Image (cartoon, rainbow, N blue to C red):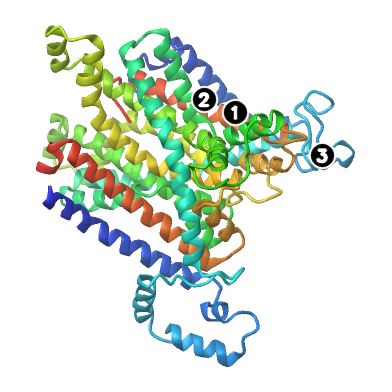
Amino acid sequence: MSRPGTLRMLTRDVGAALSFGFVALVVLAAILAPWIAPRDPYATDLLAIMQPPGGDYLWGTDGQGRDILSRCIFGLQVTLFMGLVSLIAGGVIGAAVGFAAAFYRRLDGVLMRLMDILLSFPAILFGLALAAIFGPGLTSVIIALSIATVPLMARIVRGAALVVMGQDYIEAARATGMSDARLVWRHVAPNCLSPIFVFSTLRLGQVILLGSALSFLGLGAQAPVAELGAMAAQGRNFLFIAPHISVIPSLAIFAVVLAFNVLGDALRDALDPRLRI
Amino acid sequence: MRRYALQRLALAAPVLLGVLLIGFLLMQVVPTDPATVRAGPQATAEVVAAIRTELGLDEPIWTQFFLYLSRLAQGDLGVSIINSVPVTQELGATIGPTLELMFAALIWSIPLGILLGTLAAYWRGSWFDRITMAVSVAGVSLPVFFLGLVLIWIVGFQYQLLPFTGRGGPLWTMDGFLAVILPAVTLGGVFVGPVARMTRTAVVDSLTADHVRTARAKGLSEFRVVLRHALRNALIPVVTLIGLQIGFLLGGAVVTETIFSWPGVGRLAVGAILSADFPMAQGTIIVLSAGFIVINLTVDLLYAVLDPRVRLS
């Protein structure tokens, strides 16, 4: 990010430019949902149930006659919120663990073994366990996805911080008598931003995919909340009469996740060609 | 090798204990009384009290934990709140189908992913490479349920080519084989992309290595160079990464089982959680977690067998 030319490299890559534009559009749509959605996402119209896309309702209606386009726009809001909150919560804790492991070498072994243990369980399992304890809901999903993000971020940050800590300027800063916290905050962390940024972009896509899968299973967002995974699940009952009810929200998830993945890959190539996550 | 294996086992044991402890604590926080559940709906207060004593529910919590462990060792995980069936009995019936589904998904997706990744690495920069990598990114971004629903809708319903609900029997029978195709394509479909990507990276690295240049200089055929010298060395990281991705696959299995009504552990777990059947939910989560521990242990050991540097370091 800090290096000049990153933006230019991104705009030269057509796929990356397109995904960047798409991500910006999606975020904007989610924020502006109440103003741009053509209809109330919860208003039912029993005279117009399961309308195919194209007519009065641009993307058709669902089994209760609700406007799918409006529900998708509001669904983006829920989906992105879920993704961002779990990314930030898990990312901040993970980064703290990663810095601590790189900085205090005595803690390194213990911390990273703990991270390995967390890493050996998939996010879906955390989702199942938390839904079993706290009951299905968006909160359970967010906590589960945060926990699953912690070890991944810890590994990325530890790796990046170890490289930075080997540099001469860190030794110099230390020699001036700078406190540990200040050293990390002022000198180590800013130089680890590239890999953190790349990882966060790619992870956001994965978190959205996992979260919508949990919602699809009924363990996440609960009816009538418009959430893309939950909408796809509700459409299952009408799959053979009105497949668009499931297909449209699924396509929306696919497009958003794909955009984050393409953007993340391009960012990685632009910021650090050697970086492999 | 033996020392390495023992070290790994020693690391896995406390993790398993941790999982069991969490499973135990899960039952402490949920609003159900195991004694009432075991006694059944018509039981009198005396019967419930007797069962409570028998289960040791009046004991201190640590004693209860050890009693729980000893019951677990005897295969007693409690009974379902919904239908009073022992949890272990249900689990025993569902583990097989889940393994079957995962096997059917892996048997085609790993070879295909390795093949595509190797070819993409060999012809790197070509249109084949670009298309394969683009399709891989798309595959990684595809919700499992989307692929499943589209297959059910088109292959199962529109053209009625294959069954799409439940398991048809053992894999080697015709019905069983046909029934597993769509779920296996769904689950394996999201796995091909990651395998192809990982293989491509590893083979590209390996193709530029000195020993491959030597093999070429010796005048070996390209086929032999790629297969015996480049791919073989590249397989070590690929095997590890595939192992790590199996967790991802089991996550996908939970969704796949639900969509196709496949009678596996994942579907059982989701059903139990949604119907607040706590003993069943606890049992499925313990079994799934233990499954991961075993998978990770196996991958670690396999890695050590393939790459002597791991066990000697």
User: Where residue B186 appears, x then y in whole percent?
Assistant: 53, 35
Q: Residue drawn 64% across and 80% down?
A: B41
From the viewer's perspective, is the residue at label 2 or at label 3 nearer? 3
Nearest to N terminus: mark 1 or mark 3 = 1
Q: Is residue A118 visible to the viewer in this orientation of the structure?
A: yes
Image x and y of residue A95, in percent? 33, 43
**Left or right: A253, with B7 as reference point:** right
Are callouts 1 and 2 both on one chain? yes
Disc 1 versus disc 3: nearer the observer: 3
Disc 3: host chain: A
Residues at marks 1 and 2 touching, judged by CB atoms closer than 8 Å: yes
Q: Name which residue type carries label 1.
A: Val
Amino acid at dot 3: Gly
Label annotation for residue A259? 2
**The C terminus of chain B, quarter of image:** top left
Name the residue tied to disc 1: A26
Amino acid of disc 2:
Ala
Q: Which of marks 2 and 3 is nearer the N terminus?
A: 3
Placement of B109 over or under A3, stated as above or below: below
Q: In terms of secondary structure, where does tag 3 sit?
A: loop
Residue that mark 3 sits on: A65
